[in-house]
Amino acid sequence: MAKTSAIQRNLKRIKMSKRYENKRKKLKKIIMDKKINLNERFEAALKLAKLPKNSAKIRVRNRCEITGRPHGYYRKLKMSRIALRKLASSGKIPGMTKSSW
């Protein structure tokens, strides 16, 4: 089990990234548009820099929904390899069996 403080910090980042998503998109659109005046683009870049760093989507860490483990994470299943194996071994995932050869 991961530290609860790390899990809570990541949840906070997820909430912030959702809250500021539209604002960040609008500012980035202004910054990337070459037809807009350079001063306006620079002001948009300054506004973007003033937003909280944790509101960036890149700061969110993929963590296991069950254990909070940050490594060995399967995106489709939203869980770590260890949690997946434990559920599969206990027969909680239909169609999945432990392989042996």
Image (spheres, rainbow, N blue to C red):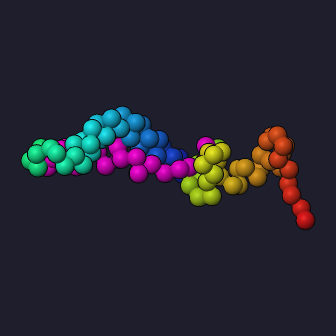
Q: Quadrant of the C terminus?
A: bottom right
Q: Residue 13: name its quadrant.
A: top left
- The dominant secondary structure in magenta is helix
Q: Is residue 14 above or below residue 98?
A: above
- In this view, the residue in front, 82 or 5, is 82
Q: Residue at x 71, y 55 (%)?
A: 82
Q: Residue 99: name its quadrant.
A: bottom right
Q: Is residue 15 above or below residue 3?
A: above
Q: Is residue 21 left or right of residue 8?
A: left
- In this view, the residue in front, 26 or 83, is 26
Q: Is residue 53 left or right of residue 4?
A: left
Q: Residue at x 82, y 40 (%)?
A: 94
Q: Is residue 43 left or right of residue 72?
A: left
Residue 8 shown in magenta: no
Q: Residue 100: name its quadrant.
A: bottom right
Q: Residue lying furthest front in this view? A: 35
Q: Is residue 64 left or right of residue 88?
A: left
Q: Residue at x 27, y 38 (%)?
A: 26
Magenta region: 41-65
Q: Is residue 20 visible?
A: no
The total number of labels drawn is 0
Coordinates of residue 49 in the picture (x, y in percent): 22, 49
Q: Residue at x 36, y 47 (%)?
A: 56
Q: Residue lying furthest bottom in this view? A: 101
Coordinates of residue 42 in the picture (x, y in percent): 14, 49
Q: Residue lying furthest right in this view? A: 101
Coordinates of residue 92 in the picture (x, y in percent): 80, 40
Q: Is residue 70 visible?
A: yes
